[in-house]
Amino acid sequence: MTDLTALTATQLLDGYRKGDFSPLDATRAMLERAERIQPEVNAFVRLTADEALARAGESAERWRRGEPAGLLDGVPVTVKDILLLRGSPTLRGSKTVADKGHWQEDAPSVARLRAHGAVFLGKTTTPEFGWKGVTDSPLSGVTRNPVDPTRTAGGSSGGAAAAVALGAGPLALGTDGGGSVRIPAAFCGIFALKPTYGRVPLYPASAFGTLAHVGPMTRDAADAALLLDVIGAPDSRDWSALPPAPGPFGAALSGGVRGLRVAYSPSLGGQVAVRPAVAAAVRRAVERLAGLGAYVEETDPDFTDPVDAFHTLWFTGAARVTQHLGPHQRELLDPGLREICGVGARMSALDYLAAVDLRMELGRRMGRFHDSYDLLLTPTLPITAFEAGAEVPKGSGHRRWTGWTPFTYPFNLTQQPAATVPVGTDGDGLPIGLQIVAARHRDELVLRAAHALYEAGIARLTPCGS
């Protein structure tokens, strides 16, 4: 019998259409998988089994009548516990958020999924307020890597990545303010896309401002395009949301990479020390992309590490989100978060505006860079997953998570679309990701290149235990 937990959303929909199985079958299988993996990896803060089964039953009846409600009718999906899900508390990984209340509103992306008949399995884990690149919090504990539970799943959408990798739903909603869908996807061996800022509307607005994106986390690029077609529509609650895309993202997948101008930057001009196994796997994937007809040139974008500007924007955002807390509540915070909030609170408006100036200059440089190149390829991360429960690898010398994520946060500053694709493993079997970046509003190019890698067998889901 088909293992329904191993199927993509596209394959599930095909099975529903043919009558091979129903949304109830898929939902039951994925809820069972979620319950089985939870004690070891801690991917969920809450499963919404009763609601999921009820929605799956309604979907099954629609499919029986040949009247599906939307593009994702009956497909199980998870929602990061940063995003509002009607009827379920959104505690954002924090003991300082009260779970009492009616919780009667959906985030824009969740509302779109609901309208298209998706089945919500539950809420996935996040570090407190999504503040760091690994997933642990005082509220929900440590989320672990599905390949090796002694390692981190990455973050801040770590629960979402672990759930997708282990078959607890083929689709997940994550958020990304400095790499938070790409980091855990790379560590867990799945696909994730940070779309152009505004492509997926966000409400309530993030305290991290226009660094914060909502993005799909999936088993492959085709599923991500399908999910983006659903969630990438404007919502009146987000004044910065983009107008509808000119056409379906799924329709753009088949273009291939022949003739695309591709820049390959293995280390951002020597600024990043990349582990040899990571560098080798990424280079092999880039060479295969050239073999598919892309014009690849090894070159670097013209910028120095913007980490100080990113810290200014990030730390002040953290200070803002916790500004209302009293002394007792502050004692409940993750110590690392409490520390950066203190730093952020001491920064001035001039510090903030200086960071904005640097951000605008970085955006200008990348805009000019993409006049010459359609895509930029880099490693997603210079390392593979390290020990669970730590913000930085032991002995690394890094003070904060940004020390080991230098390829991700620059493209939050510039608001460009950026995806991670699994392209191999290291000697310990830990996944390695390739990052694909395009100019703003060229999300379809990122998805198209990623899909070509999957079609050619270069990218593939990393096998995980179940």
Image (spheres, helix red, strand yellow):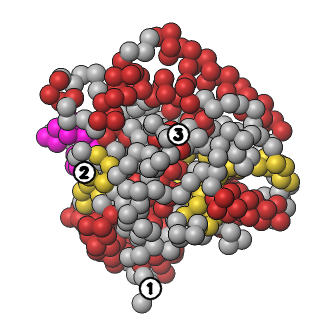
- Residue shown at the point (23%, 65%) measured from the top left: 49
Residue positioned 30% across, 67% down in the render: 40
Q: Is residue 112 left or right of residue 322?
A: right
Query: In x, y percent, where is residue 111?
Result: 37, 47
How much space separates mark 3 and mark 1, taking CA atoms? Answer: 43 Å
**Image position of 345 with respect to 134: above or below:** above
Q: Secondary structure at mark 3?
A: helix
Q: Is 408 left, or right, of 327 in this rendering?
A: right
Q: Which residues are magenta?
A: 87-100
Magenta segment includes 92: yes
Can residue 385 be spotted in the picture?
yes
Residue 273 within the magenta-colored segment of the rendering:
no
Q: Residues within 10 Å of mark 3 (few under 14, many from 20)?
A: some
Residue furthest out toward the bottom: 1
The quarter in which the C terminus is drawn is bottom left
Which residue is denoted by mark 3 in the rendering? 403
Secondary structure category for the residue under label 2? loop
Quarter-of-image position of residue 191? bottom right
Closer to the observer: label 3 or label 1?
Answer: 3
On residue 190, the disc is none
Amino acid type, callout 2? Ser
Provide the residue designation for mark 1.
Answer: 2
Tag 3: amino acid: Gly
Residue with the mark numbered 2: 140
Which of the marked residues, 3 or 1, is nearer the chain's N terminus?
1
Q: Characterize the magenta stretch by its predominant secondary structure.
A: loop
Residue nearer the viewer, 149 or 79: 149
Q: CA distance from mark 1 to mark 2?
A: 33 Å
Identify the element where label 1 is drawn. loop
Q: Is residue 447 above or below residue 357?
A: below
